Image (cartoon, coloured by chain):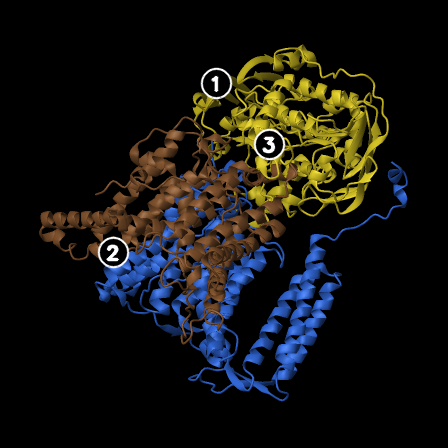
Amino acid sequence: MTDMVPGEEPAVDPPADNGEDPSNGPNGNEPSAMYKRITGIGTSAAEAAVVPILAVVTALIVGAFIIAVTDVDTLPLWGSDPAEALRLTMSGVSDAYRALFVGSVGSFKAISETLFAATPLILAGLAVAVGFQAGLFNIGVNGQMHIGGLAGLWVGFTFAIPAVFHIPLVLAAAMVGGAIWAGIAGVLKARTGAHEVISTIMLNFIALFLVDYLLTTSVFQAPGRNDPISKPTGVTSIFSPLFGSYRVSIGFIIALVAVAVVYWLMYRTTIGYEFRAVGYNPSAGRYAGMNVAWIYISAMAVSGALAGIAGVNQIVGVEPYRAISNFAGTFGFDAIALALLGRSHPVGVLFAGLLFGALRAGGREMQGAAGVPLDLVLVLQALIIVMIAAPELIRAIYRIKTPTKDITTVTSTGWGS
Amino acid sequence: MTLELRGITKQFPGVLANDNVNLSVSEGEIVALLGENGAGKTTLMNILYGLYTPTAGEILVDGEPRVFTSPGDAIDAGIGMVHQHFMLIPVFTVAENVALGFEPLKFLSWIDTKKARETVTDISSRYGLEVDPDAMTEDLPVGIQQRVEIIKVLSREARFIVFDEPTSVLTPPEVDSFFDIVNGLRADGKGIIFISHKLSEALEVADRIVIMRRGKTVAEVKPEDVDEAKLAELMVGRPVDLVVDKAPAQPKDVVLSVNELVVLDDRNHRSVDGLSLEVRAGEIVGIAGVQGNGQTELVESITGIRPSLAGLVHLAGEDITTRSPRAIHNRDVAHVPEDRQKRGLVLPFTVTENLVLDSYHQPPISRWILMDWDAARDRAVRLVEEYDVRTPSIEVEVSTLSGGNQQKVIVAREFDRPVQLVIGAQPTRGIDVGSIEYIHSRIVEKRDAGAAVLIISSELEEIKALSDRILVMRGGKIVAEFDPSASVADIGLAMLGSEAETVAS
Amino acid sequence: MTAVADSNEMVIKTRATPEEKRATFIGLVLIALAAFTLWAFGLGVEPGSESTFKLSLPQARFEDLSWTVDSRTVALITALVLGFLGGFVLRRSHLKRTNLALSAGLVLFSFAFLTWAAVDGSFSLVGMLKSTVVLSVPVILGGLAGLMCERVAVINIAIEGQLLTSAFVGVIVGSSAGIWVALIAAMATGAILGAVLAVLSIKYRIDQIIAGVVINIFALGLTSFLSRRVLTEAPGLNSPGRFSSIKIPLLGDIPVIGPMFFDHSMFVYITFILVIMLHLGLFYTRWGLRSRSVGEHPKAADTVGINVYRTRYRNVILGGVIAGFGGAFLTLAQVSRFEDNMTAGIGYIGLAALIFGRWRPLGVLGAGLVFGFARALQQKLGILGTPIPSEFLSMTPYIVTLIVVAGVVGRARPPAADGQPYIKD
């Protein structure tokens, strides 16, 4: 079994282009409103570091059990030859995890695959994190990726201009598309008080069917096809690979820039101050003269814009550079896990994204080499979120003494009104 | 037949709420438990009622030690409680609320609604507590809701009844009729614990007064042996006088003028209903009134937080009726909000971040959209010094500060500029005496500097001490105006108005 | 200062109340629907066209019941009535009737739409209504599962995961031990996931939305993982039997109503019985009174001796059982095999039905039928070949829910404590 801990992540440049020390700001290390609400982790730095690591390790151990008990070929053997069964099971598990390790950081290609997989995860995770900071629960990243992605794709195949202009234009279109789609939920919350969880869930499905429909219209559909599949994007709009045949693309650079920009926005600008103030206490924000309605709308829009980039990356950054039905997959849910794991902090999200990217890249190798379906990664992610969201579980499992401070409690608000 | 609490200690993380507290009550006796806010009275009662488990100590009923792990145990032991915040389900009828937890059944789990209604009418006629069993609880006035609570307790055949700050939401005449009810209960042989921080009430109604301070019982006295001054000294540990040192007001031009204002509350009721008032420069106008008569909505509407339905608000001659909170703030209006934790502060933010809540959007704290945290820290250092905010550092979360210091943060932020209008809603609620005096003196200072001041408080004493002119608000309107020298009785009657006769009779 | 002095002469402006604004909006919507009906369904149809509705199924006892109407007349009358309703609402004289007018308008509009869809052809109205009922069953069950939880203030986003997992377990057990055992296993699975949700949100006080999302990811991941790793290896495990239809004697032969309601598998009957039981239980029994008190004001419930935690655990687990029953319906009655992510959002539609139904069992029933109608319509329109893309009908439940949460048809009031953990001490 490998020791997959965040510290052993592939050596990626930290966001050096960030140019600022995260701890320098007044709140560089302050977890977001939502993160505190959800986990109760607030002030203890040691615990904040230990919990995510233990969560990942525990998830991997549980994953090993799941692999073992679903080993259909070996299961009957436990009755007749337990020793052999144990050996086979252990080797099955270790094969799987070795593949997971090798497939994520075992070679330059593997690292490239990890970064490639991490790209949309980081962007989508940032989207959720920005929402969390402003006290908004954006479950709608999936829908925003779909709409933003399709908007970017349209720009991608409609124009033929040099890449220097084309790619920014594609990005802008994707951001606008995602921002508008998320903005609907923001407007509904701001104007009518509709809970964003409900409205973004609904918007996810609406986007899903809308994309399905659009992909069958002549504007998008690939010529000669009857199924929902789009024309490929224009050559000049492709996020081209950074290193020849390796898949990691300039999308990853865009994600790093996004991390830096989000950091700057949240901790260095009045906009971020407003987002965070309203996230913690909208009544106080209103009292302080902030336009809370507008802040909800703009925070959702920023969140959606990031999701839009994530969405378009899945089209113009992934071969064969075209859109299919439900191309955003489960990224929306992965993003929630990432934002939690990264404590809603942009740099945290970056590392969480790299970890999940490694799980994905390794998971594919695991599926190919060891025959363990990739879906295990989803299970691992779910386990990680549970343990991040309930640090008491970790404390119970590892008999860590409860800190003396009173456990902060969740105050998720009701909905509908 | 006695109820006794012996050596009760309750340790919360970081707070020793109760420290070896002793208290007893017999049947047919009224014991007043007196103490300042935060003295540990409510904690003690929650222990008695099985809501908290004591760290040490025991509860004896008729001499038998009993362990209460839930309110159900306390109810079984004959203990009933009327909580400060009523424990009624707003969307249930009176009969449903009374029946809850004690439902009469027809068969299986099917509720006998007829019997539930009869229980209410029986008890209400026996004790003279008129209530309609089919009324929806949320539609009832506070005084009637309290009756529902009492009926609830009586329907469980409680022998000992605890009233937690029962008069804090009532008008003076309602208080009188409440005392009639309590005396009736005593005559019926109930043992009553009456929790209050109001001296006069304890003296008026109790057979015995127990005084708590900082989690300890510090004294037990008979009402005939003491006066208010002595009780106050026992409560706070030093003599207090709620007198604000100020020169006579010299009112000048009208600064704030409110005309026929109508404001809806969250439930779309006209909680401010055609209200008019004026405040002049250099005077403090206090609004007295029972809570929930539209004061909150009035302040929110003047300061632009809540839109009004009709009417006009003028500030120094300019119509600000539909202006945003920021536009109004920028016209030199300081607003100390009613609920400091809900509105005035962002609790997880640091002291620095809270001190720029009003000015983060303008130089020197920010330029364009860029925050200048150095400028923010400079301001924080200066204000913490100037306003005597006791904090270990300007980088700690404001939630770690005491209530008085949190309030000083707000006052510092709002008063740190020339202002023409100060609006203070409950400016000293729930904070220590030292901070109260400090904040009052700062408010008078602003008046003397020429600001118009509007104070809203549910503490009549504070209104009387601070105001140059007193307005009484009831049913969303100003119904009377008094000189600060007017008697509490007169003002109290105006606070209740015409309903006084119906409730009192 | 002068402005203040002569303020008595000023006009006091009155701004519109939210109710009045809403009425204006809905009135305009109705007028717009009227115009659309006139234009698309009325003028867009050849004069003299006829639409035929079949009112019986092929093998019914009374065969060949049908009803033919003049397409254009129906549209014109509908447009007229819609316009009248719109004008009525716009007058804002009877604000309480706004929703009634809106519902009446929408029913009429649907009928006009069907008439238009069936122009110059025949449309099996009964067939569609029957599948409306069938398709609404998992939605209603999902909604009721959510209702059980939210009435005690635990938000349940995990309905989808509960349905999916129990559908999966139903298939495996059904293939190896028979459908009755499978039904019980599926319900037990729902109960276990309910218990997980309960423990996470009540004991560990995880944000309930997070807890629900986690269960959904876990369910999707685990069922897909197991289906690839186990069901593909052993396809025999993916073919359980089916609960067959039970036609109720006599009632099942009534035209229209019979096939619609009385010729189904026992799941359908139990679902309807469950709705009635929950309605009575919630509003007339001790269990319901106590549950609602826990959802509205848990502290008050605690002070009268009700165990808030136990009540929440019990109801959330029972909610899981209902979802498990719904999952079993998917793989033991509707189809009889499992496919990856086969619920495809039904759990979320159930959540939508719960909100649309305003947290009431009968409301959930109504909402479920409306959403079932949309899904049935979507299937039938494909056959009729109307130019409306089926994707737009698929969106209906979600758009309707968006409109509901936006408060356009009146603000629904969820249990007051919904989503908030209860902390003693």
Give me the chain that's brown.
A
| Quadrant in the picture for residue B471 | top right
Instruction: Tell me the SS state at disc 3.
Output: loop
Circle 2: element type: helix
Q: Chain of mark 3?
A: B
Is label 1 or label 3 in front? 3
Tell me if residue A323 can be seen.
Answer: yes
Measure how far apart labels 1 and 3 are at the Cα level. Answer: 40 Å
Find residue C379 and report its horizontal and vertical position in percent: 46, 74
Could you confirm whether marks 3 and 2 are on the same chain?
no
* Mark identifier at residue B345: 3
Residue position marked by numbered label 1 in the rendering: B6
Q: Residue at x 45, y 45 (%)?
A: A257
Q: Quadrant of the N terminus of chain C?
A: top right
* Figure colour of chain B: yellow
Q: Chain of mark 1?
A: B
Q: Secondary structure at mark 1?
A: strand
Question: Where A215 sits versus B110, above or below?
Answer: below
Residue where numbered disc 2 is placed = A367
| Residue type beneath disc 3 | Leu
Q: Amino acid at mark 1?
A: Arg
Confirm or deny contact between disc 3 and disc 2 (CB under 8 A). no
Q: Is residue B120 above or below residue B416?
A: below
Instruction: Pick the residue in front: B300 or B93.
Output: B300
Q: Colour of chain C?
A: blue
Q: Position of residue A412 (x, y in %)?
A: 50, 43
Query: Residue A138 versus residue B5: which sits nearer the camera?
Result: A138
Name the residue nearer the viewer: A393 or A314: A314
Label 2 lies in what chain? A
Which badge, 1 or 3, comes first in the chain's sequence?
1
Answer left or right for C86 relative to C227.
Answer: right
